[in-house]
Image: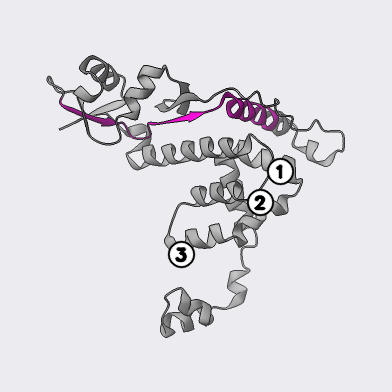
């Protein structure tokens, strides 16, 4: 009761919760595993790297007992974002993991932004004859990330593809392990998270283009990035015209 009161529930709400038949809570024992399956689909490289280090599916199951999960439920937040925070806060030692998590979390957020705008049915508004203000199109984002993180994602995706061809590899002792390329220490590069017909794609951006998109944090005047570039990006549906 004290815990329920701490969460802001009154006596009536607490009694309703306490009155739930516990058998109902056990009716679907696989609901956490299904949720984990969906999360691993969104942060698949991150999950694979975490499992390669811990060797325990119980590590990922621990997300549902974590403060990250409980805070997400109480705040009605994003499950994928909470899962990413769980992985980032787990203290794992694989050096590429934090950036891999951040990239995949940003991809998940971009997918949600695009879906909220209509997904594949979204259509950019027509470009006016005189463009005044622009904003990023739904799902478009940028970030600076190292080539080491991208190489780790590619390695994990290849491993998962091969494992998916023969799922029974999980039962044998001589299955090839996930091997990540060793870190090179290469400096970060500018990446664009760009919606395409195939989903959200990662694109390496030239510095001038990255810097221009970096200036578009909301509705922005075309003078802030240059009229010619703004018109080109609107035509490519990376930016949209704002009335």
Q: Is residue 195 above or below residue 105?
A: above
Which label was assigned to residue 51?
1
Q: Is 58 placed above or below 169 here?
A: below
In space, the residues marked 3 and 1 are separated at their CA atoms by 28 Å
Q: Give yes or no for residue 144 being in the magenta stretch.
A: yes
Q: Earlier in the sequence, mark 2 or mark 1?
A: 1
Residue in front for this viewpoint, 218 or 58:
218
Look at the numbered disc 1 and give the secondary structure of its residue: helix
Identify the residue at the far right of this view: 173
The percent coordinates of residue 175 (x first, y second) are 82, 33
Dot 1 crowding, Cα within 10 Å, few <14, some 14–19, many 20+: some
Q: Pointer 2 and pointer 1: residues touching (CB < 8 Å)?
A: yes
Q: Which residue lies under the disc numbered 2? A: 60
Residue 207 belongs to the span the image colors magenta: no
Which residue corresponds to the image point at 62% horizontal and 36% vertical from the top-left? 45
Residue 198: tell me if it is visible: no
Report crowding for label 2: few under 14, some 14 to 19, many 20 or more residues within 10 A (C-alpha): some
Q: Is residue 114 left or right of residue 49?
A: left
Q: Residue at x 87, y 33 (%)?
A: 174
Q: Which residue is mark 3?
A: 74
The residue tagged with tag 2: helix, strand or loop?
Answer: helix
Q: Which residues are magenta?
A: 132-160
């Amino acid at each position: 009761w004290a815990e329920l009161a701490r969460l802001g529930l009154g006596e009536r709400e607490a009694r309703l919760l306490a009155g739930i038949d516990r058998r109902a809570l056990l009716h679907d024992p696989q609901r956490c595993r299904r949720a984990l399956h969906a999360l691993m689909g969104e942060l698949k490289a991150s999950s694979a790297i975490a499992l390669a280090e811990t060797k325990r599916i119980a590590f990922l199951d621990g997300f549902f007992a974590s403060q990250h999960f409980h805070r997400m439920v109480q705040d009605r937040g994003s499950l994928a974002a909470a899962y990413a925070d769980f992985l980032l806060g787990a203290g794992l030692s694989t050096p590429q993991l934090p950036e891999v998590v951040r990239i995949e979390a940003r991809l998940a957020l971009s997918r949600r932004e695009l879906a909220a705008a209509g997904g594949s049915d979204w259509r950019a508004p027509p470009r006016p004859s005189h463009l005044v203000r622009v904003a990023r199109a739904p799902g478009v984002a940028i970030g600076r990330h190292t080539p080491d993180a991208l190489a780790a994602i590619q390695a994990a995706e290849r491993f998962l593809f091969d494992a998916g061809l023969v799922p029974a590899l999980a039962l044998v002792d001589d299955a090839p392990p996930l091997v990540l390329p060793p870190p090179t220490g290469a400096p970060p590069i500018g990446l664009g998270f760009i919606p395409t017909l195939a989903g959200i794609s990662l694109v390496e951006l030239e510095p001038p283009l990255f810097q221009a998109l970096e200036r578009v944090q909301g509705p922005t005047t075309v003078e802030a990035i240059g009229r010619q570039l703004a018109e080109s990006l609107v035509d490519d549906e990376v930016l949209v015209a704002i009335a």
